[in-house]
Amino acid sequence: MNTAAMHAILIENLKQLKLSSMTKNIESELRQARENGISYEEFLLNLSELEIHHRRENGRKRRVKEAMFPLFKPLETFDFTASPQLDRRLVRELATGEYLKEKRNIIFMGKSGTGKTHLATALGIEACTEGHRTRFVTGCGLANELIEAGDKKGLTRMLKRYAGYGLLVVDELGYVPFSKEGGELLFQVLAERHEKRSVIITTNLGFGDWTQVFGDPNLTAALLDRLTHKAHVIHCNWDSYRLKETLKGQARVTHGTNSL
Ligand code: ADP
Ligand code: MG
């Protein structure tokens, strides 16, 4: 068999094996190997690494899409100088995803505009990169979804889905109180994940105020007990980033007017 025929069959084989990146790159890699006298081992290593890289990137994109983040806010876009009290080292450590292996939760607690959602999203994106199936949902959205799941079968399916994510981000827990049913269903989701899979929560409420949201004091106590067990609780007590940006904008406008 001549070289051209072998090439054609080789490409066909790679296609059949669904090695799309290897198929795409084989010609250029072969050329480079010939030109630079690269060994068989190195050639195959380079080619297989291209495939692995491509698959990892595709998987990451798929997981980020599935997570349904409201905005794409990776950690690189978070300005640590704006929140000096935040333990940078802890955030960087959390970004490695070690907490996911330890099945620990993270609770971002504090007032509005301090970057809680941004940080939760950034850690969610990191989790996607590390290969964890992730879902971002607001507390209210999750409760409504569960209530609307319909019959027992639908609800069981949904509870199973929420138990299955490698990471569940529940944003804005506490902004709106839940109905009795909503609170109980949310409790089921969170209790089911306890010590099995991690949850990230953002909330504007201190733990003492959670009963107002869940209604039932016993249920709230049981929930807090599970959620906070071994959790990283990060208090976001610095000034609102949003407000600071607005004030900066206003200062610019005023300054501009004065200088006219
Ligand atoms: P919270 O959830 O605490 O109310 P957000 O995460 O929604 O706050 O932050 C409000 C806005 O300010 C968002 O657009 C967010 O991206 C931005 N923001 C907050 N903190 C920072 C920061 N340290 N660096 C960059 N952007 C920030
Ligand atoms: Mg928020």
Image: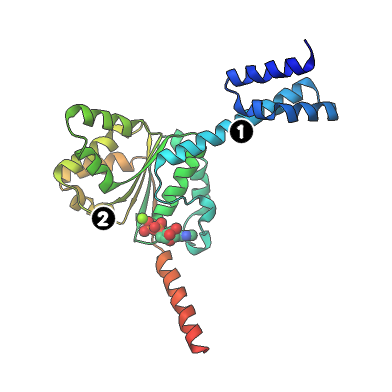
* Image side of residue 85 versus residue 40, left or right: left
Amino acid of disc 1: His
Inspect this view and state whether residue 239 appears.
no
Query: Which of 19 and 163 lies nearest the eye of the viewer?
Result: 19
* Image side of residue 159 versus residue 133, left or right: left
Does ligand 1 reach within 8 Å of label 1's beta carbon? Answer: no
For label 1, the residue is: 53
Residue at horizontal 20%, vertical 43%?
183
The crowd level at tag 1 (other Cα within 10 Å; few <14, some 14-19, many 20+) is few
1 vs 2, front mark: 1
Query: Which of 149 and 232 lies nearest the eye of the viewer?
Result: 149
Label 2 sits on a secondary structure element that is loop
* Image side of residue 11 versus residue 246, left or right: right
Does ligand 2 reach within 8 Å of label 2's beta carbon? Answer: no
Q: Which quadrant of the structure image shows residue 204?
A: bottom left
Q: Which quadrant of the structure image shows residue 25?
A: top right
Q: Quadrant of the N terminus?
A: top right
Residue 175, disc: 2
Residue at horizontal 31%, vertical 41%?
227
Q: Position of residue 7 (x, y in %)?
A: 73, 19
Residue at horizontal 46%, vertical 80%?
253
Rendered position, 165 above or below 2 = below
Q: Position of residue 187 (x, y in %)?
A: 23, 39
Amino acid of disc 2: Tyr
Q: How much space separates mark 1 and mark 2, taking CA atoms?
A: 41 Å
